[in-house]
Image: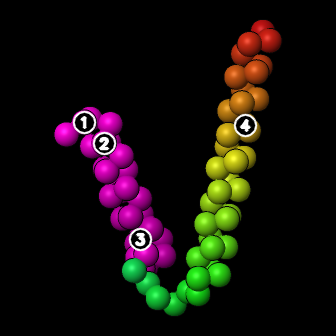
Amino acid sequence: MDGIVKRVIEAFRKRSERGLEKYGTTLERNDLTNLEWLQHLQEELMDATLYIEKLKDEEKNKQSN
């Protein structure tokens, strides 16, 4: 198996374990509506957009120095 794929699988495994420890449940839970799941997804994507913007700023700053 590709080493990158192995690392991603391991990262998913660890993330699942952390989520279970933090929230006491898995994604197999059924106490959220589809709209609530979509809200969670939207918030995660918003965070990702912020991370991208931060890294873009850092790269721009590197290039201007």
Q: Nearer the viewer, residue 62 or 35?
A: 35
Of marks 3 and 2, which one's residue comes earlier in the chain? 2
Task: Give the quadrant of residue 14.
Answer: bottom left
User: How far apart are labels 3 and 2 at the CA level?
Assistant: 24 Å
Q: Quadrant of residue 1?
A: top left
Most extreme residue toward the right is 64
Distance of label 1 from label 4 (alpha carbons)? 30 Å
| Pointer 1 or 4: first along the chain | 1
Q: Earlier in the sequence, mark 1 or mark 3?
A: 1
**Residue that label 2 marks:** 5
Main secondary-structure element of the magenta-colored stretch:
helix
Dot 4 or dot 2: first in sequence order is 2
Of callouts 3 and 4, the N-terminal one: 3
Which residue corresponds to the image point at 31% horizontal and 50% vertical from the top-left?
10
Residue at the image point whose x is 80% and y is 12% from the top: 64
In the rendered structure, which segment of residues is drawn in magenta?
A: 1-27
Rendered image: mark on residue 21: 3
Is 29 left or right of 47, judged from the image as shown? Answer: left
Which is more toward the observer, 34 or 32? 34
| Numbered disc 4: secondary structure | helix
The residue beneath circle 1 is: 2
Q: Amino acid at mark 1?
A: Asp
Question: For mark 4, what is the residue?
Answer: 54
Task: Indicate whether residue 23 is drawn in magenta.
Answer: yes
Mark 1, Cα crowd under 10 Å, few <14 / some 14-19 / many 20+, is few
- Nearer mark to the viewer, of 1 and 3: 1
State the CA–CA distance, disc 3 to disc 4: 29 Å
Q: Is residue 10 above or below residue 2?
A: below
Mark 1–mark 2 contact, CB under 8 Å?
Answer: yes
Helix, strand or loop status at disc 2: helix
